[in-house]
Structure formats: structure tokens, C-alpha cells
Amino acid sequence: ICTVDAFDKHFDPAIIAINAASAALHLVNLPWAGPMGAVRVRTGGVIGDNIGYDIVTGGGASANRYISLKGLSMTVAGLGQGRVTMIEAGASEAPDSMIMEALELAQPEIEARIELQEELKEQVMKEAAESAVGAAFS
């Protein structure tokens, strides 16, 4: 459970909470299918054939402001390698192609969040091993 202690309307804590919970679980030796990453993909709408996407990693204005005519705000979480575990979306007249493109844009960002968690675990394990060796020779 992630608890929000402070909120300022400019930062949506949902994405940060998903990634933080995944990192915490990844650092302990529990059986689970993670790590996982999460991002929000949103549009301000469609102008002709051009769709403007914005990848949100935790900061930014409330997603609800970005759902306009033919707009989309989608939270995507996954295990990497194209394995999506959760999609939560709000949309107004969003065509299927927009949703598929948003999912495709989310994948490399999810991979980046997972890679950060892997690096964090590697660093924590390295420091724990060095501390254990240091303590054994003290």
C-alpha cells in the first residue's frame, strides 16, 4: 500500500506509487512475477492525422485535463518484453489506432522503469555484500 502524505494537484502519485511498490518488492526475496513498470500516455487530441502524445512518468498536471475531444489518458503497467499487466484509460472518441499507438509508445518507457529497478537492486545487493564482508573482517 502506498499512502500519499501530500498532494498538490500538479503531480499524480499513481505512476510513482506503482513503480515504487514494484521497486520495494523487487528488493526483497519474495516470489513474484516482477519487476514491473508503469507510465501514463496521454494526448491533447488529434489534429488531422497527427496525434501528439505525452509520456508521464509521475509528474505533470492531472490527467483529467487532457481528455478532450478525441483525446486519451491511459495508464499502462507491464512486466517488460511486451507483457502488459494493466491498462486503465479514459478516452473520448479515441480510435483504435490511437489506443494501439499509445500502448506501443508505453512499452519502451516501461522497459526503462524496469531497468532502473534492476540497477537499484544490483546496487543495493552490492552494498549489502560489501557491508557483510566488512563486518566479517572487523
Image (spheres, helix red, strand yellow):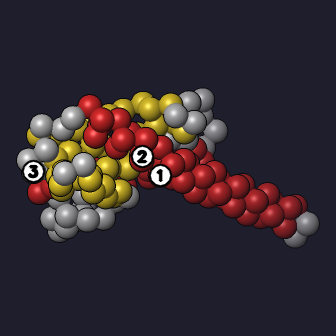
Q: Mark 2 belongs to which amino acid?
A: Ala
User: Left of 111 or right of it: where is 87?
Assistant: left
Tell me the residue at 32%/50% (across/down).
40
Q: Residue 123, image x and y in percent?
A: 69, 61
Disc 1 from disc 2: Cα separation: 5 Å
- Judged from the image, the secondary structure of the residue bearing numbered disc 1 is helix
Give the residue number, with chain letter if any, for mark 1: 109
Q: CA distance from mark 3 to mark 1?
A: 24 Å
Mark 1 belongs to which amino acid? Glu
- How many residues crowd around disc 2 within 10 Å: few (fewer than 14), some, or many (20 or more)? many
The residue at 57%/36% (across/down) is: 81
- Give residue 97's position: percent from left, percent from top: 30, 35
Residue 122 visible? The answer is: yes
Q: Nearer the viewer, residue 19 or 92?
A: 92
Is residue 135 left or right of 8 when viewed as pictured? Answer: right
Amino acid type, callout 3: Ser
Q: Which mark is residue 100?
A: none
SS label for mark 3: loop
Would you say the residues marked 1 and 2 are in contact, meaning their CB atoms lie under 8 Å apart? Answer: yes
Identify whether 69 is placed above or below 12: above
- Residue 108 located left or right of residue 51: right
Q: Which mark is residue 68?
A: 3
Return the disc, 3 or 1, that comes first in the chain's sequence: 3
* Residue 13 is at least partly visible in this image: no
Q: Residues within 10 Å of mark 1 (few under 14, many from 20)?
A: many
In the picture, the disc for residue 106 is 2
Quarter-of-image position of residue 138:
bottom right
Percent position of residue 32, x then y = 56, 30
